Amino acid sequence: MAQLQFKGKQFVQNHHLSVPYHELIPKKDKSLTDKVSLHDNLIIHGDNLKALKALLPTYAGKIKCIYIDPPYNTGNEGWVYSDNVNSPMIQEWLKANKPVDNEDLTRHDKWLCMMTPRLKLLRELLKDDGVIFVSIDDNEVHHLRMLMDEIFGAENFIAILPTIMNLKGNQDQYGFAGTHEYIVVFANYRDKSKVGEFSLNNLEEEGWEEDEVSYFKKGANLKSSGVNAPREKRPNLYFPIYITKDNNIILNRSSKDDLEIFPVTDGKEMCWRWSKEKMKSETYDLMVAREGDVVSIYKKQRPELGELPSRKPKSLFYKPQYSSGNGTNQIKTIFGEKVFDNPKPLELIKDILSISTDSDSIVLDSFAGSGTTAHATLVLNKEDGGNRKFILVELEDTVADKITAERVKKVIKGVPRARNENLKNGLGGTFSYFELGKPIELESILSGSNLPTYKELARYVFYTATGEEFDESKVDEEKNFIGESKDYEVYLFYKPDLDYLKNTALTLDRARSLGKHNGKKRLIFAPAKYLDQDHLDELRIDFAQLPFEIYKLAK
């Protein structure tokens, strides 16, 4: 496979591994829930690289759909490359600390250096049968495809979807008036033999319905356009038709409950456009719609072969609702003014979630911006009764608080000015707001500086040692118990207190005080131990010393 080369590649290939885990600090005052929890819908304020790493202990391998809208690297966006990679060349980039613009001859290299570790962590969070969608334009689409080939595997490539965002065309673009962007789509199968199993849900095309014959759209109303001329001109086309209780159309009454319909317009007797014989032979192409006492009869319009709706989502993404201006109008409806540039339209993200998730899926957007992904998730749940969860990550201070979280809060509670009844009344739901805290660097245990809380260290050591999800509700700090994996009961002797750490060790009394075994071995983390290997074997204990042996089992 062809390899993508760029400046700094050798330094960022494994940068995601060196990024320290960070504490996730709950912010009750910024949340919309009675109980802040990492298992709620989440909005996380902080650098998305660090936030993705912090999510691993709880969400590794659990995300069904990822949608991201990273910087397109047009040279006009003003993004700054800020990853603290240990390389003289990249440190020189960081020293400049200025936005990446058209004058920066290494802007494509910087963009690739920024995307590489993030995509690697996103893949770790994605389920094996999950799917990732990345919005992009012509500036980086070619680089992105090759980068994702390397990270996700070329065999997991699904599509590059041209997505019509501006049908009128952007007259400011060079050469051609731009009408589209792209969405790059990859699956995540690690087992290549399963790649062919990947499928997306059908995307319903607006206006099309299906009956026992084929697809159709609602056509002309026979009671208006189906009425041809006054009765006296064509008396043979003046006859009744009958509508049964179950809305079938028949030519001869079969029951006293059948509703009799004559071709009458504004009290004047008219004639049908079709003969009785034609109506009889094509009754299957007529449909009835009732609204209270008003009955309408429509001719079904059957598509030509080239118009047939696809059972799969089409590789050209287009609806009038995908207009970029539509996204701006939605923001104005929610906030009363334009507060965000180029927000993604709700219908686009909703369709992406429709084809890629089921009712209990977890959705992640690590470039959250205006919060469209959360909004779309809540709309879809409202429509189909689903219980999808969203996780948003947003770096910018004012955006995370004043736009991302505020938008989600408003659509949950309701937007009085909205025309849509669901949005006006509120979509319902909750979310928990977290901020990134200090890094969990276990070497700090040796010095006693920046010690993590008990639960944050528990989350870190449990996931790192077992590779399994950490469940905070199982923690019993008094008993030093932090959870159970498929192989172990896991214990942590720790307090964020230097005197405790200097004077605490696993002793025989402490080991026996843990009680009877449930059949599994015990994995015990502590600053030291005063037990020989014979006693550890007798008590079925694997000991891991803090901070040195955290990775012992995982490796």
Image (cartoon, rainbow, N blue to C red):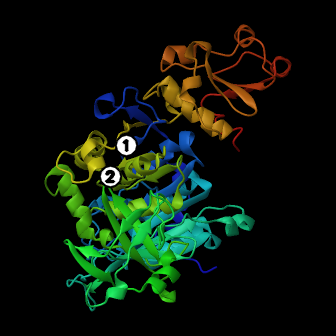
What residue type is disc 1 on?
Ile
Q: Quadrant of residue 68?
A: bottom left
Q: Residues within 10 Å of mark 1 (few under 14, many from 20)?
A: many
In the rendered image, the vertical position of residue 368 relative to residue 177, given as above or below: above
Secondary-structure class at tag 1? strand
Front residue of this view, candidates 195 and 534: 195
Residue at image x 52%, y 83%? 281
Residue of label 1? 43
Front residue of this view, candidates 313 and 4: 313
Q: Is residue 313 left or right of residue 518?
A: left
Front residue of this view, candidates 111 and 149: 149
What residue type is disc 2 on?
Gly
Residue at image x 47%, y 62%? 244
Residue at image x 51%, y 69%? 185
Q: State which quarter of the image contains the N terminus.
A: bottom right
Total labels: the figure holds 2
Residue 199, given in percent of the width and then of the height, sits at 61, 66
Q: Quadrant of residue 150?
A: bottom right
Distance in Å between CA atoms under marks 1 and 2: 9 Å
Residue 485, given in percent of the width and then of the height, sits at 70, 32
Instruction: Kindly tell me whether residue 341 is visible in this rendering.
Output: no
Q: Residues within 10 Å of mark 2 (few under 14, many from 20)?
A: many
Residue 96, given in percent of the width and then of the height, sits at 28, 62
Circles 1, 2 touching at the beta carbon (< 8 Å): yes
* Sequence-first disc among 1 and 2: 1
Residue of label 2? 371
Instruction: Kindly tell me whether residue 96 is visible in this rendering.
Output: yes
Label 1 vs label 2, nearer the camera: 2
Residue 229, given in percent of the width and then of the height, sits at 25, 86
Q: Quadrant of residue 228?
A: bottom left
Q: State which quarter of the image contains the C terminus.
A: top right
